[in-house]
Amino acid sequence: MHTTGELYKELHELVDSEQYEIAINICNKLKALGCNNEDVLRTKIYCLIQRGKWHQAINYIDLIKGRFSTDLFYERSYCLYRMNRLEEALKCLDSFCVKSTNFVDTSILHLKAQIFYLMGRFQECECLYKNLIGISDHNNAEEQMLLSVNHVAVQASDENLSIYSNYQEDQSYIFFSSYEYWFNLACLHIVNKEYEKAVRALNKSQEIYMTANPTQSEEKEYNSNKSDMCSFKLCRAYIFQQIGEYDKALNLYTCCIEEYKLNGIFLESSIVQLAVVAFNNMISLQTRDKSDNYIDGLNRLTITSKENFYNKLISSQKFSICLNKAFSCYSSPQYNRYIRDAEKFTVYKTKLELFKVGIYMLQGKEKKALSSLEYLHKQSPENLAYSNALLSLAIKLKSFKNIPRFIDIILSQYIKVITKEYKSNTDWISSSTFEHLIRLLIYTKMDKVISISTIIYKLDTFCNSLKQALNTKEGAINNNIIAEILNILGNTFLCIGMFSKSVECFSTALNITSSNDMSSVIGLVISASLNNNSNLNLKQYLRILDNKLPSSMFSIDPETLERSEIPNIPHSSNNLDSEPVLSVCQKSKSKHHKRKIRYPKGFDLNNPGPYPDPERWLPKEERSSFKKLHKTKNQRNKGTLQKGGHQGAIPTSDTSFRNKGPSTAKKEVDTDNNHSRRQRRKRR
């Protein structure tokens, strides 16, 4: 029988050696001996938490409630956090923070930041990490590194936060030895679409990791570090996927699944989350028939993992999983259920609405798709690049009946933005965005969506709006951007045959800029030469073009040029600037592609061999070769028993049961009648 002092000493040694299961039994023995002090009860709760027995820990906290000087709010909220009951855990922490406004422990802020991270509230999480970095001990390098690693991870999870990130490739000793920091920095560069920096950061992270873990050949070390090596490969595959090298990405994903057994059959619980990431990224690279196995793969992962792997995922990952499930079965009734699940985890509703638009287009529900696009445009009408993206989606619809109304809405918004006075804002409109809109207009005209008069009216309104913007002296507008837009308008007017408007646009663009832009000069010369009523003096612009030409051009003899042969110019695809005049007004020619001849496998065009039999699809008895072979046999066996007759069959013909000679049917009938009459007379 151990004494109380011996049990206390043994309990202390067990906790130091991390033997928590035996330590729980010692706590029960001490409680049975009447030792119900605060240290023993807290030690038991600590051991239960370390063993991952969250339910037992919460039940025990509720059982001993009121025996401590302070409530076990932190232990309770941590257990709720690990059980994925995030809202309850946050309420528990907030209730304590309201009671104790004077001082808040940093561990509470750490836990609250982790809860915000899993809930997808990244902006609040980033504010907490900024406060923690500010109040933390700068002499503690380990704490600084941990906070910086988590801070970068939060910024990499949110696109809006990643834009304003100040983290660079720091070469200090604190970050130089942390492979987690470099890995999260690579993820941050991926979000910002800086893929070269992402590859450098990922290589640096893997180099530091391999230096710290040189014994990768041993089996135990390999199994313990399997998840880290898998993370490096999956991140590299995702970079390949983003830069468009889909074959390399798919091969690397497949290699990870085979090497680390991510298929869910023999999967370890430590890399279940990585398997979900691999399945999530591969669905966009696979064909439609293979994407149906996505839900089955997730179900296998759920069965294999000891605990629900969804508890380890953040809200954005759960959101993408729900969308992928909905995409894999968009034609089945389960689609609506997965969309409802996605609405629970969505942080930005715009992404969900854009996904619905794509699904509506796949399902052929064009009216719903167009109404969703109009709803999305109302959310941010002043974002012109966003409006162009919505317009390009609308043009991809099969039916173009309701698109002119949507185009008018976006064009009207463009005119409002142009006529609006902007102060101290030079980038008030992007020329590339405007050019994209003009291309979309011409594309819709080719498909007979809107009339040419509508395009002319809208473009004329654009010109007037630009002139009004130039005449306003209050707004500080960048003239170079307006000149680029005027050049685009001038080329568009030149294509549709409005040469006077084209001259006006090019001349205005040259007047508002100090430098003579060659594209404006060339456009002005072409449009003025085609316009018969133009009174513009082109001598100064022709001199500019002459100065740009090489001196060898003026030493050419015209007679020699006439005698020379015409060179063969290769055909090039027509762009917007190289289209012939009035090409927009003409009807587009229908393209009939010749069907490609499909040859059988192993067929040689140089040695094709004999032609195939044209009667090879007919039944055997109907082929001419079969009839020739069996012609004499059929004549010989005519009137006899044919092969394949049933047992007891006899040969049949027209004369088999008929008596030869004249018919005696009437005579036989008369004799039968006479005989019956005689019999009747005798009876009487």
Image (cartoon, rainbow, N blue to C red):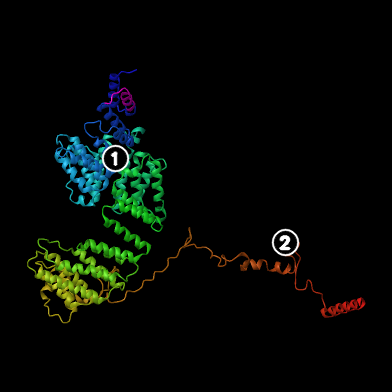
Q: Determine which quarter of the picture holds residue 492.
A: bottom left
**Residue at the image position 30 percent from the left and 39 percent from the top:** 82
Residue 328: x, y in percent?
38, 54
Count of marks, rendered view? 2
In this rendering, the label closer to the viewer, 2 or 1: 1
Pick whichever, 45 or 625, lies toward us. Answer: 45
Residue 621: x, y in percent?
63, 66
Disc 2 secondary structure class: loop
Q: Which residue is mark 1?
A: 80
Pick whichever, 295 or 528, lies toward us. Answer: 295
- Highlighted magenta segment, given as a residue range: 24-36
Q: Determine which quarter of the picture holds residue 92.
A: top left
**Residue at the image position 17 percent from the left and 43 percent from the top:** 130
Q: Determine which quarter of the picture holds residue 672.
A: bottom right
Mark closer to the chain start, 2 or 1: 1
Q: Which residue is mark 2?
A: 646
**Magenta residues, dominant SS class:** helix
Label 2, label 1: how far apart the Cα atoms are: 83 Å
Residue 42's place in the image compared with 534, above or below, is above
